[in-house]
Amino acid sequence: MTGYLTTHVLDTARGCPAAGVKIELYRIDGAGRSHLRSLFTNADGRTDTQILPAAEFEPGTYELVFHAGAYLDETGPAQEPPRFLDLIPIRFGMAEASHYHVPLLLSPFGYSTYRGS
């Protein structure tokens, strides 16, 4: 089996996929973090391509940064600055070559994640 990474962003307050969310992927190493790519979610709340394709998979520690504040500003009621949620970093490890799915369940005042399938 080959390893790769996907995500899915769901707006739990509105009950729909979160389209247009910018997501950045970083690899974490001893020297800090290296930016690998930036993508946006589509109408289904997913990226059009794998965030980390099999050809680039390496075990290690990674970080997804979800730009939730910009999405919430576009889709929800205006809030006084600073917005409660803005950038949501999720740092996780991938130890073996398999499918890693890291979804984000998002609302204006909270979020959750898990290892999906």
Image: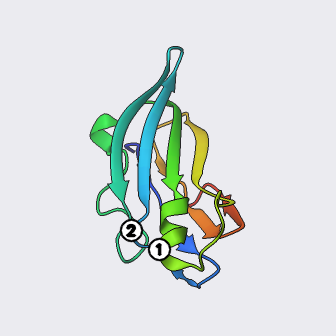
Residue at horizontal 36%, vertical 62%?
47
- Which marked residue is nearer to the observer: mark 1 or mark 2? 1
In the image, residue 31 sits, relative to residue 74, either above or below, namely above
User: Mark 1 or 2 closer to N-term?
Assistant: 2
Crowding at label 1, few (<14), some or many (≥20) Cα neighbours within 10 Å?
Answer: few
Crowding at label 2, few (<14), some or many (≥20) Cα neighbours within 10 Å?
Answer: many
Q: Relative to 108, is 66 on the left or the right?
A: left
Can residue 40 be spotted in the picture?
A: yes
Considering the numbered disc 2 on the image, is that residue within a helix, a strand or a loop? loop
Q: Residue 59: which numbered mark, if any?
A: none
Q: Quadrant of residue 34?
A: top left
Residue 41 position, x and y percent, is 38, 65
Residue 61 position, x and y percent, is 54, 31
Residue 44 position, x and y percent, is 40, 76
Q: Quadrant of residue 48?
A: bottom left
Residue type of the residue flagged with mark 1: Glu
Q: Quadrant of residue 102?
A: bottom right
Q: Mark 2 sits on what residue?
A: 20
Can residue 101 be spotted in the picture?
A: no
Residue 12 position, x and y percent, is 63, 77
In the image, residue 24 sits, relative to residue 103, either above or below, namely above
Q: Mark 1 sits on what residue?
A: 74
Considering the numbered disc 1 on the image, is that residue within a helix, a strand or a loop? helix
Residue at horizontal 59%, vertical 84%?
14
Residue type of the residue flagged with mark 2: Gly
Q: Nearer the viewer, residue 53 or 66?
A: 66
In the image, residue 79 sits, relative to residue 113, either above or below, namely below
Do residues under tags 1 and 2 come within 8 Å of each other at their CB atoms?
Answer: yes
Q: Relative to 11, is 109 on the left or the right?
A: right
Q: Residue furthest bottom?
A: 15
**For the residues marked 1 and 2, what is the alpha-carbon distance in whole angstroms?**
10 Å
